[in-house]
Amino acid sequence: MQAEHFDVYDIDGTLTIPGHDLWYLCTRNLSADKALFDRYVAEWKSEIHNGMDPFDRSLTMMKRGLALLENGVTSERVADEVRRIAGNLIDQELVWREAIDFLKRRVRAGSGAVFSTTNYHEGAVGFLLALHHSGWISRTEMKKIVVSGSRIDWRSRTVVHFNMGRNKVIGLADDLGISAEAVRAKIDCAFGDDPLGSDRELLEIAAYPHVIKNENHRHLNLPARLKVVAWPEVEVMSVSESMVLPSDPASK
């Protein structure tokens, strides 16, 4: 990435409408035992709701999902499946067009862009390909977007790097080929939907952190520096105005 500074965008629940997470949809579609996968997901959600460590329980959930995949699932198949699913979400208007239009404006203005997700790295690749195949971004724009996600050894189905919480900064450093200190110095805007969980560290180090409104954090008492916004509000503003979007107290 040649840009001096860059913006970071979470995918599931941030660029996609909440409730349509690409990790869940992809892993379930490729699972050899969908009933058992659904049981594991229900247990995982209950554990998080009951206050168990989100990082530990989410990592365990990813490992369980990997163990249930059909025989012969490869990185290429995962990327292709996410591309297909994301294309359907785009067709159903379940991806924020305003978010992608904002990203394109920022890139044209000289900022770099990174998709950072807890989903598999191949999931982020598939999402990016779907945006291009659907005509939302050009090939030139696509090449300017870096993707960062969980790294999997698909032969052994083991998690090499789990891209959640504090590990998202490590993932960014690895995928951008810079140090963690440089990541902290270069990150401008960050957009996430989970300010106290998977997106917390990115939002803490970003110069201009934005939390995309949803029901899950409507009643949370968030730090004042976190700007709680909806994508239509972000998209209509100029690039410079995006840095100082007002927080909406009613949404907290």
Image (spheres, grey):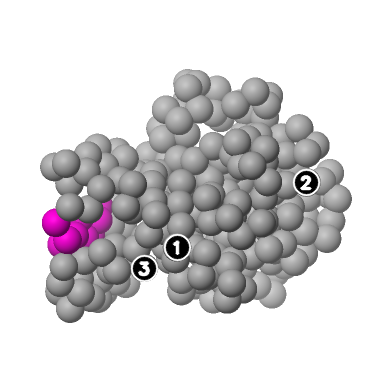
Q: Nearer the viewer, residue 73 or 208?
A: 73
Q: Which residue is mark 1?
A: 84
Query: How many residues crowd mark 1 within 10 Å: few (<14), some (14–19), many (20+)?
Result: some
Q: Residue at x 39, y 51 (%)?
A: 79
Residue 133 image point, x, y percent: 58, 55
- The residue type indicated by label 2 comes to Arg
Percent across and percent down for residue 47 are 24, 69
Q: Quadrant of residue 197?
A: bottom left
Question: Which dot, 2 or 1, sits closer to the camera?
Answer: 1
Tell which of 111 and 123 is nearer to you.
123
Q: Quadrant of the C terminus?
A: bottom right
* 140 versus 185 height, above or below: below
Residue 244 horizontal side relative to residue 190, left or right: right
Q: Is residue 70 left or right of residue 113?
A: left
Residue 53 shows in the view: no
Question: What is the crowding at mark 2: few (fewer than 14 residues within 10 Å), some, or many (at least 20)?
Answer: some
For residue 61, which quarter of the picture? bottom left
The residues bearing labels 2 and 3 have C-alpha atoms spaced at a distance of 30 Å
Q: SS of the residue at dot 1?
A: helix
- Give me the residue at 16% from left, 68% from top: 32
Picture coordinates of residue 206, whole percent (x, y): 61, 40
Q: Is residue 36 visible?
A: yes
Label 2 sits on a secondary structure element that is helix
Q: Give the amino acid type for the residue marked by disc 1 in the picture.
A: Arg
Residue depicted at 75% across the width and 42% down the height: 106
Q: Which residue is mark 3?
A: 25
Query: Which dot, 1 or 3, sits closer to the camera?
Result: 1
Name the residue carrying label 2.
105
Considering depth in this image, is 173 or 115 the residue closer to the camera?
A: 115
**What residue range appears in magenta?**
59-71
